[in-house]
Image: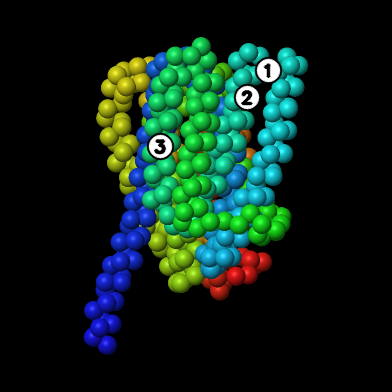
Amino acid sequence: MGADAKTAPVTERGRKFAMARMLGSAVTSQALLSAASFAVGLLLIRHASDLQYGYFILASGAVLLIVSLQNSFLNPPLVNRITPLERPARSELVGGLYRDQNRVLQIGGAIAFVSAAGLWLGGVLDLHTGPLIVVTIAAALATLQRNFFRMVLLAHRRPQDVLLTDVCYVALLVLGVYLAIRLPMPAVGAMIVTGIAAAVTGVLLARALWRHESWDVRGARGILREVAPLAAWSTAGAAIHWAFSQGYMYLAAGTLDLTAVAAIAATRLLLMPVNLVSSGIGTLMLPLTAGWLHHHSAGYALRRLCAFAFFLACTLLCYFALLWLVRDWIFTVVLQKQFAHRDALMLMWGLAFLPMVVRDQLLYLLVARQRFHQLTSLAFFGAVISLAAGYVGMLQLGVLGAPLGVLVGELINLTGIVVLSLRQLGVRQASPVGRGEIAA
């Protein structure tokens, strides 16, 4: 009895230390990516034309959409299934997903390249947009491979391995873009660099995963088809959410022009560090939420998620207050550019990011409970209202309409997620793992 009493506190401290270490690695990794994103944007803002910066924003936004769809399709079933499995079953699961994903990427990539070549030869694409689309497709394929191994390592709760490769990715990306801004088409050069950095670090991530736990590409036959019916809902929800979280850029390009896209993106870039820290914590929130549901209850999980959301909201407010005080110096010295309505754009983005970082955390209770149908319906309703508000806002207010539409969508999404999460408190569920998991 005495021995147990002495070892129990050590074990509890060990668990807390392990969680803090995982979260610290994830936040550090995302902080690096945030710094790299800011550095890339800063280099292009300062040394490229607004047109080239606008092209880069649209191209990188397309890659972001594709990666978001991959995350939404593969990450929930991967985390929910891998948590209770023994090593042989995990090896089959990861190998099956990797094999099936590669087949989809090979077919999809071939179709995309042939379509782009046809449009280019047909005169639909010009000497600026043609090369940009081709290199964006290549960058997207490399990024999808990198992100797959990143997801698996995080599902294994190994953010330290991810952090090491992210350091390499950031170094390659920033150095490459520093060279690319000297090219006649900086946007094309930046996307080439993005693809190279993703390809190199994808190999490093694969090696790190293989050393930790190898995968069997002959296992889990048809796993992608098996998870598709449920994963399709989460993927549709991600696509719909992207429509109002990123689609406003394409709406602004069509309604206004690419210089307006540059102004909107440049002011939003200043808020991205907090958003990317939120995303960094989010990479571990699904595995943690699945564990909380497995060992405790929905109420316990929701309280933990609310604590993380409150912390990030306070972080955002402090960061924005500092940003507002030094805004003149940032635009004059750091960005070396002035944009119309810059202060109003900053305020609107600050308001939009507040519900965004809270929503990012509270979302995971519903994802772990696999309430994808409800989330998709909510995202669709929010996206329709958001895009409509953004379009009307751009017609009436110009560039200020873009963050206004995002703010409306985020408030609708956050309200719906809170309501749906509270309803989960009365729902009994033995395990967060969905039906049809692979038998060990």
| Residue that numbered label 3 is attached to | 168
Q: Is residue 210 left or right of residue 280?
A: right
Q: Nearer the viewer, mark 2 or mark 3?
A: 3
- Give the amino acid type for the residue marked by disc 1 in the picture: Leu
Of marks 1 and 2, which one's residue comes earlier in the chain? Answer: 1
Compared with 200, 333 (above or below) is above
Is disc 1 in contact with disc 2, using a CB cutoff of under 8 Å? yes
Residue at 27% in and 27% down: 326
Of marks 1 and 3, which one's residue comes earlier in the chain? Answer: 1
- Give the amino acid type for the residue marked by disc 2 in the picture: Ile
In the rendered image, which quarter contains the N terminus?
bottom left
Residue at 30% in and 66% down: 14
Residue at 61% in and 57% down: 216
- Give the amino acid type for the residue marked by disc 3 in the picture: Cys
Give residue 84's position: percent from left, percent from top.
53, 68
| Residue that numbered label 2 is attached to | 133
